[in-house]
Image (cartoon, rainbow, N blue to C red):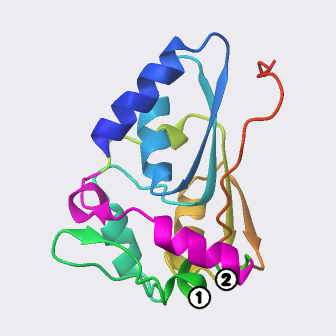
Amino acid sequence: MHADAEIVAGVTKATAGLVVLLGHSYDGSVISEVAEGAANGKGLVYVAAFAPEAGETALGLTGRFPGSTLSGGANDFGIQQKLFPAQFAADVPAAQARLMAAGQLPVMDAVLSEPSAQPAWKHVPSWFVYGDADRNIPPAAMHFMAQLIERADAVPHPAQRRVNRPRLAGPQREIP
């Protein structure tokens, strides 16, 4: 996680103007660390994401609350292709879910077990939205994390996890 945060921090610091960082799933841990050291990081948006306290891990938070059906192997985590649609993409067409299952990359357990640094959500404006039927990060865990972020606007959504590959359309604009 720390290596990913360093990469994103480099891009963030090289960006002219203010930056709002958005993290989905594991990337919530990453943006929390990035914004802590970025003077131009002005907001955090957590979308069905981890927002750990200092020293917490993604795996620790997932295992602390009932409801996750995600399981891992000895060194990495992935979702069996036949289980992927129900596990991770129940809100998308079946053909797209099968394609996503075939293209998924595993996540190393070492990354999900890295303790989080001091979180930026303690002093950077933050927002949190999540599906109340998520099967990867238990909704109770996301509710807990949203409550930790006292200034956050937590929005539970009556849906599972939506996984899309957004594209950047049009010119990039700075946020005033």
Q: Is residue 160 above or below residue 19?
A: below
Q: Quadrant of the C terminus?
A: top right
Q: Is residue 91 left or right of residue 80?
A: right
Left or right of residue 1: residue 126: right
Label for residue 90?
Answer: 2
Q: Amino acid at mark 1?
A: Ala
Q: Which residue is mark 1?
A: 86
Magenta region includes residue 11:
no
Prevailing secondary structure class for the magenta stretch in the rendered image: helix
Is 104 part of what is drawn in magenta?
yes
Percent of width and height locating residue 27: 48, 50
Query: Does residue 111 show up?
Result: yes
Question: Which quadrant would residue 95 be assigned to in this image?
Answer: bottom right
Q: Are marks 2 and 1 in contact (CB under 8 Å)?
A: yes
Instruction: Please report the residue visible at 24 percent of the width from the left and 54 percent of the height from the top.
Output: 114
Secondary structure beneath label 1: helix
Is 26 situated left or right of 41 in this image?
Answer: left
The span picked out in magenta is 93-115
> Who's the residue at 59% across and 88% down the image?
86
Residue 160 visible to an observer of this rendering: no
Provide the secondary structure element on which disc 2 rests: loop
Q: Residue at x 48, y 37 (%)?
A: 120
Residue 170, given in percent of the width and then of the height, sits at 83, 28
Residue type of the residue flagged with mark 2 = Ala
Q: Quadrant of residue 104?
A: bottom left
Say whether residue 50 is left or right of residue 115: right
